[in-house]
């Protein structure tokens, strides 16, 4: 059974940093693209970043470019999302999900999802 588990969320002040982790069980992440999504209260879930299965190409939504970095450690079967210069509008539940490739953030292309980790940015 495939399971994705996110961790690393928490409460941080504006300007602070967090590193989210997405570890997979029952699935080798290095053969999959992995995306990060987020859902803020009262809003639809949106794609944030994706790392491809080949060549580790990375993609970001405009609102996080220059602040967030996605990476993978295949030895740990884990994908990370380093989040710097956090803003209150980054507050959301963050999810990781797998896809065949990073082709936009259309959710129907992502077939395994984690349960999410809460990120709160507030002073």
Image: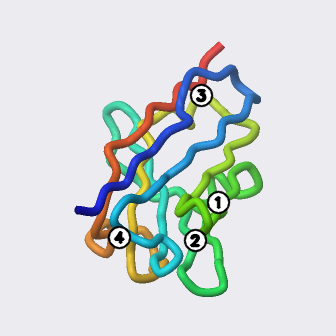
Q: The N terminus is located in which quarter? A: bottom left
Residue 91 position within the rendered picture, expressed as x and y whole percent measured from the top left: 51, 32
- Quarter of the image for residue 94 reads top left
From the image, state whether disc 4 or disc 1 is nearer to you.
Answer: 1
- The x and y percentages for residue 67 are 73, 49
Report which residue position mark 2 lands on. Answer: 51
SS at badge 2 = strand
Q: CA distance from mark 4 to mark 1?
A: 18 Å
Residue lying at the far bottom of the rendered structure: 54
Label 4 neighbour load within 10 Å: few <14, some 14-19, many 20+: few
Q: Disc 4 designates what residue?
A: 106
Q: How many marks?
A: 4
The mark found on residue 88 in the picture is 3
Q: Residues within 10 Å of mark 2 (few under 14, many from 20)?
A: many
Q: Nearer the viewer, residue 104 or 5?
A: 5
Residue occupying the point 53% across, 25% down: 120
Precedes in sequence: disc 4 or disc 2:
2
Instruction: Assign a secondary structure to mark 1.
Output: strand
At mark 4, the secondary structure is: loop
Q: Which label number is shown at residue 70?
A: 1
CA distance separating discs 3 and 2? 25 Å
Image quadrant in which the C terminus is located: top right
Q: Earlier in the sequence, mark 1 or mark 2?
A: 2
Residue at image position (56%, 36%) is 8
Tag 1–tag 2 contact (CB < 8 Å): yes
C-alpha distance separating marks 4 and 2: 14 Å
């Amino acid at each position: 059974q495939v399971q994705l588990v996110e961790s690393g969320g928490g409460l941080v002040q504006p300007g602070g940093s967090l590193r989210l982790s997405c570890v997979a069980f029952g699935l080798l992440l290095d053969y999959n693209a992995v995306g990060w999504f987020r859902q803020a209260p009262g809003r639809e879930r949106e794609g944030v970043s994706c790392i491809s299965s080949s060549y580790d190409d990375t993609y970001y939504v405009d609102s996080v470019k220059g602040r967030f970095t996605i990476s993978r450690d295949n030895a740990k079967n884990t994908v990370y999302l380093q989040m710097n210069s956090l803003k209150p509008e980054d507050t959301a539940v963050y999810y990781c999900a797998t896809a065949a490739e990073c082709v936009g953030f259309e959710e129907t292309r992502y077939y395994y999802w984690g349960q999410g980790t809460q990120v709160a940015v507030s002073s």
